[in-house]
Amino acid sequence: MTITKKAAGKAVKKTTTKKTVGTVKIKKTATRKNAPGAASAAEAQNIPVRVQNAPPKFKTVSSPVAAPRAKTGGRKPKMAIVSLTSCEGCQFALLDLGEKFLDFASSVEMVDFRLIEEEEDPGTKLDLVLVEGNPVTEDNLKLLQSVRKRSRVLAALGNCAAMGGIPEIKNYHEGANTIKHVYKYIQGISNPEIKEIDNFVKVDFYFPGCPINGEEFLRYAPELLLGNIPTIPDSPVCVECKKAGNRCLLLDKKPCFGPMILGGCDAVCPTARMTCQGCRGLRPGANIKAMRATLKTMMTDEEFENTTEIYGLRDDVEESLRTTN
Ligand code: SF4
Ligand code: SF4
Ligand code: SF4
């Protein structure tokens, strides 16, 4: 597939409105469970499956994929961007890069990029596949497992694929009843309880954010194409917030999650005087217990829990609090 300005423009015209979530009034319910079928399918393929409630995934260790360094023998690396069930906002974040994305795309052989053009999947071996969204349908699961098998490196593209994202909110709320209404007219739902992709396949790298940060994509994607797994610096949103010269929202008793959240988004929310709600996930070195204690003075337990559900943060927070008690 050749990505031209015309093709990219065509995709932009298809832009859908991204649903934003503000304050969500939600009841407390049970936490997620692993799907036995899903786990056994992955185990059968000898794929390490992420355990639910595992610690934050933005670790500061290198993956074994990093060695040996990939060789493409002089050819352009082959890459695909696939979308499972999602709003496609992360793919649009790539197109928003404009010329910069076209320059990047010209350095690879783009085998599949659903937003631009739906093509028959020829089963090509890939150097890198980016996966956006959640595996909700049987077809989603098949596609996910297929691209894992034939790609050297698989990266989650955005908060939905990495952490369950906004769709995961419904896991916490009267499961069956909610699912009945959400998927009323859709057939073939095999994973109605949202689980992020590393419950099914091994994931080598996570692009955080809802949506992802395009500049961050341009920084790390070339490394991934070479088979190297980069490490996102363990720096909180607060660092970028301070650089922007913002007055800290915590000083005004506004419950901002910034100190425990992985930076890299240019602190867009606090710069717009909105609290950070953690779409980039917990940072590895965060002191969640101390942060929770600070936030307790600004929000109720229910408000805290509800906010952690917006971007799939709740499981990681609960696990972290459990293990540090
Ligand atoms: S992470 Fe956000 S922008 Fe990306 S697909 Fe999910 S909801 Fe859309
Ligand atoms: S407003 Fe939020 S992100 Fe900014 S310094 Fe304060 S806690 Fe950190
Ligand atoms: S400030 Fe927080 S919620 Fe906003 S984009 Fe950054 S990580 Fe996401």
Image (tube, helix red, strand yellow):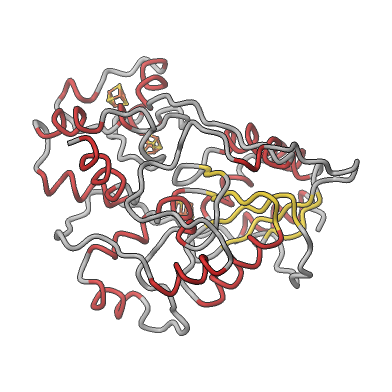
* The image quarter in which residue 38 lies: bottom left
* The image quarter in which residue 248 lies: top left
Give the total of numbered labels.
Answer: 0
Q: Which residue appears at 91% of the width and 41% of the height?
A: 74
Quadrant holding the N terminus: bottom right
Q: Nearer the viewer, residue 68 or 6?
A: 68
Q: Which residue appears at 40% of the width and 28% of the height?
A: 267
Q: Nearer the viewer, residue 303 or 224?
A: 224
Name the spot of residue 132 as percent of width and height, x first: 54, 56
Name the spot of residue 322 as percent of width and height, x first: 21, 43
Name the spot of residue 303 as percent of width and height, x first: 15, 46
Quadrant holding the C terminus: top left
* The image quarter in which residue 277 lies: top left
Name the spot of residue 23 as percent of width and height, x first: 22, 49
Q: In this image, 313 relative to 132: left or right? A: left
Q: In this image, 245 relative to 176: left or right? A: right
> Considering only vertical position in the picture, is 235 above or below 301?
above
Q: In this image, 174 relative to 191: left or right? A: left
Q: Which residue appears at 46% of the width and 32% of the height?
A: 265
Q: Which residue appears at 44% of the width and 49% of the height?
A: 159
> Considering only vertical position in the picture, is 78 above or below 288?
below
